[in-house]
Image (cartoon, rainbow, N blue to C red):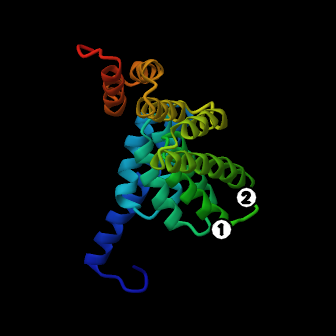
Amino acid sequence: LKSNPSNSEEKEAQTQLTKSDELQRLHSQALSAYQQEDYEAAISLLDEILAVCVWDAELRELRAECYIKEGEPSKAISDLKAAAKLKNDNTEAFYKISRIYYQLGDHELSLSEVRECLKLDQDHKQCFSLYKQVKKLNKQIESAEEFIREGRYQDAINKYDSVMKTEPDVPIYATRAKERICHCLSKNQQAAEAIKVCTEVLQLESTNVNALKDRAEAYLLEDLYEE
């Protein structure tokens, strides 16, 4: 404005300045809401700011934290992926994305993201620790699936037992392992055991189609046609 004063530019500059002050006020409120653990309010305020400040990586990371606290992991992943692109060497974003995918049971995507972190910093302690865990689990699951393709059902059952020991703290892996064990027992014509394990899976996930199909096959082996 000082270098080139004109009425039209002055009006535009004043508008931008007013908007800038408003965004700073919203930012203070968002931080306050986050600190008070009112994550829904923080998200709403951050939505307003990010509509204008689209390229702010730190605000996206803050909103991602709020989404995680609110149990909306897919939205958190979206913000963290943007933050990883917007800020150079953002190992923290890749680590968080990998952890979320891991908690959701998507071990392959988790492995892919944690590798991106280690590409940026091969000595990153958290990423390396997570990488070792995910790689081990991933290898066991791949091995078990290979056994199933080869019809080696008992070997696959043993391998999925190992999966449950490798990751006892994230329930989805135990559920998926049991679902595949149920499939193997049914295919191996161990009907009574298959019915038991499939039923355990269905108590956890009543609409699990694979477990329903495998239990039905097991019932057929036992001539339990009504069931």
Q: Relative to residue 23, is residue 191 depicted above or below?
A: above
In this rendering, is residue 208 above or below 112?
Answer: above
Residue lying furthest left? 226
Looking at the image, do the residues carrying marks 2 and 1 touch, with CB atoms under 8 Å apart?
A: yes
Taking depth in this image into account, of 11 and 216 the one nearest to the observer is 216
**Which three-letter amino acid code belongs to the residue tagged 1?**
Leu
Residue 46, percent from left and from top: 42, 47
| Residue 85 place in picture, x, y as percent | 50, 67
Residue in view at x 39 percent, y 79 percent: 1
Q: Looking at the image, which residue is at 69% across and 51% down?
A: 132
Mark number, residue 120: 1
Whole-percent x, y for residue 103 in the image: 53, 40
Q: Residue at x 45, y 19 (%)?
A: 200
Quarter where residue 19 is shown: bottom left
Say which amino acid is labelled 2: His
Indicate left or right for 177 with 48 as reference.
right
Q: Position of residue 139 (x, y in %)?
A: 60, 51
Is residue 90 shown to the viewer in this render?
Answer: no
In front of the other: 45 or 210: 210
The residue pinned by badge 2 equals 124
The crowd level at tag 1 (other Cα within 10 Å; few <14, some 14-19, many 20+) is some
Q: Residues within 10 Å of mark 2 (few under 14, many from 20)?
A: some
